[in-house]
Image: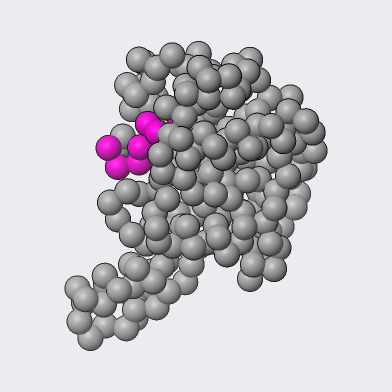
Amino acid sequence: KILTVSNPLKDILEKRLSGKEVLVIENGYDEEIHERISQESSFPKFSILYSGAIWDKNHRRPHNFFKAIELGISNGNFNETDLEINFLGTEPDILLDIIRTLSINNLIHVLPKTGYIKSLEFQHKSCILLHLSHERQKGIFTSKLFDYLGSRRPILSVPGDHNCVDELLNKTNAGVSADSPEEILHQLTLWYNEWKHTGNVKFQGIESEIRC
């Protein structure tokens, strides 16, 4: 028997390994660990966190996300001093190569790798969690996405994968997928305005779907 984490990957393996039984067990998260981490009720900054590696800037591309932030500032959707964008444990050379020419590079902080529990604490303390989908491959269900669910913070997935990630976010109502800078900006503006009025962005996830 062969195990994989999503149905699209199961289909690929069944075609390549004819006659082999392929089973799907999705990634998950440890509810008890997340319950031990305090949940913030107010955020001093409209903070956005990407947690983890990018590896290849042509495979997971934050470019449209950055364009949306630049567009939002230039159009007056956001007050620049309200924003904080953190990349936790991301390879500095890859990210700095992308952001060096951006007008918002002063808002982007590249934080060093940290332990697992500490990374979850960063997630709980962030307004929005950024997920970068694989553009060229279907069925990529990372464990990070499930820890994002456990953190109970709104998720922005860029771009939409039109596959299992989009389906998971729709089923759980835990976040939104967006492709173009304009689509990303629209969603961020909705969340930013909510934060501006309440100090928080309410997590709208469906608990019965998240825990199943």
Instruction: Name the spot of residue 15 as percent of width and height, x first.
Output: 21, 76
Q: In the rendered image of this protein, does residue 69 appear above or below residue 79?
A: below
Q: Nearer the viewer, residue 209 or 151?
A: 209
Q: Can residue 117 be seen in this snapshot?
A: no
Name the residue rendered at 39%, 54% in the picture.
161
Is 63 situated left or right of 188 in this image? Answer: left
Q: Is residue 189 visible?
A: yes
Q: Which residues are magenta?
A: 58-66
Judge from the rendering whether residue 31 lies leftward or rightward of residue 131; answer left or right. right
Q: Is 210 a magenta residue? A: no
Query: Seen from this angle, which residue lies furthest bottom?
Result: 19
- Based on the displayed image, in which of its 4 quarters is residue 129 positioned? top right
Residue 120 at x, y percent in the picture: 62, 43
In the picture, the quarter occupied by the C terminus is: bottom right
Residue name at image x 69 percent, y 68 percent: 208
Q: Where is residue 202, by image quadrant?
A: top right
Image coords of residue 192 (percent x, y)? 65, 32
Q: As displayed, is residue 140 above or below residue 59?
A: below
Nearer-the-camera pick, 71 or 87: 71
Front-most of 114 and 149?
149
User: How many marks are shown on the rendered structure?
Assistant: 0
Q: Residue at x 60, y 33 (%)?
A: 189
Left or right of 145 in this view: 79: right
Quadrant for the N terminus, please. bottom left
